[in-house]
Image (cartoon, coloured by chain):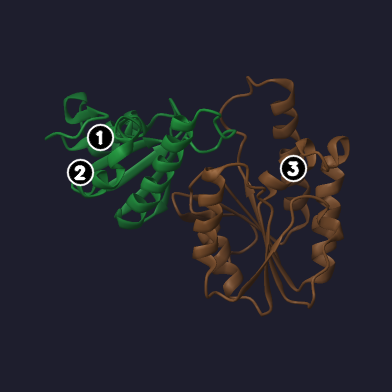
Chain colours: A brown, B green
Amino acid sequence: MRTLVIGGAACGKSEYAEALAVRKPVPRYYVATMMPFDSEDVRRIEKHRAQRAEKGFHTMERYTDLRGLLLPERGTVLLECLGNLTANELFAENGAREDALGAVLRGVEALEVQCGDLVVVTNDVHSDGGAYEAETRRYIETLGNINRALAARFECVVELVCGIPLPVKGVLA
Amino acid sequence: MILVIGGLASGKRDYVKKEFGFTDADMADAALDGRPVVYNLQNLVTASLSSVDGLLPALLLKKVVICNEVGSGVVPIDKTERGAREATGRLCVGLAEKAEKVIRICCGIPSVIKG
């Protein structure tokens, strides 16, 4: 079962995705994509790590080249999140740059092959107008294309609003 | 308490007036006072960033709380804006958890997403 969890900032999507993944078989892998830049990021990562504590997740950090990630065993994967992974592939020094879209999609495909259940968290960055510089627009468009490609083939898509899960596709587990 | 959310100018206040019979005089703009309805909660959060946790109990005593959905854009570069967006989202998750009903307005059309 593949589930895409989408929502805006601080909408409760991480908590929902974790609660969903915890109901899936072990071993559980948490693939973290957030590259820390400053103390705010470090605090955010620590907060998420604390939320995962004792839920049986093995954390694997992966900022780019998701395709190259090998999972030790077959189990459940929680990938968080595509917003960061896409930014890393687009803008980081060792990112795929022009091939960011392909790199992210191939990376998710590689995870699908290696696990039984997959939960992917992504970000709604699409609803505050489009008056951005070219680079930011490229980010919004790339992430939008990734979200659409995954939503088209995943069994379940759920939007989180104020902590409330709203089914977009499929039946909520 | 009923939580009403939606984008800017999506028809939230008009809906609350029509559906629940409130008037402009019942509605406080980003302020906590004796009036039963608060709107522009996102502005109240921005104005009280250092004491956001204190807002929740007071808001639960309102009949209706109206808030713009502000989280679905690109992460703001400005730290205060970023913090306000995060705090607004978090507060709405807390309010929704306690609310008897949560209604999301889109193009003036309500969807009851809780209750």
Circles 1 and 3 in contact, beta carbons < 8 Å: no
Measured Cα–Cα span from mark 1 to mark 2: 7 Å
Circles 1 and 2 in contact, beta carbons < 8 Å: yes
Q: Which residue is drawn at 72% across and 47% down?
A: A85
Report the residue marked by disc 2.
B62
Do the dots labelled 1 and 2 sit on one chain? Answer: yes
Residue B13 appears in which quarter of the rendering? top left
Q: Is residue B98 left or right of residue A169?
A: left
> Callout 1, which amino acid?
Val
- Of callouts 1 and 2, which one flags the residue occurring earlier in the amino acid sequence? 1
Say what secondary structure mark 2 lies in. Answer: loop
Residue B23 appears in which quarter of the rendering? top left
Of the 4 image quadrants, the one containing the C terminus of chain B is bottom left
Report the residue marked by disc 3.
A88
> Callout 3, which amino acid?
Asn
Using the image, name the chain to which the residue with label 1 belongs: B
Q: Which of marks 1 and 3 is in front?
A: 3
Q: Position of residue B96 (x, y in %)?
A: 36, 52
Q: Position of residue A15 (x, y in %)?
A: 51, 60
Q: Position of residue B32 (x, y in %)?
A: 19, 35
As drawn, which residue projects farthest toward the left?
Answer: B34
Do the dots labelled 3 and 2 sit on one chain? Answer: no
Q: Number of callouts in the render?
A: 3
State whether residue A101 appears in this view: yes
State whether residue A173 appears in this view: no
Report the residue marked by disc 1.
B38
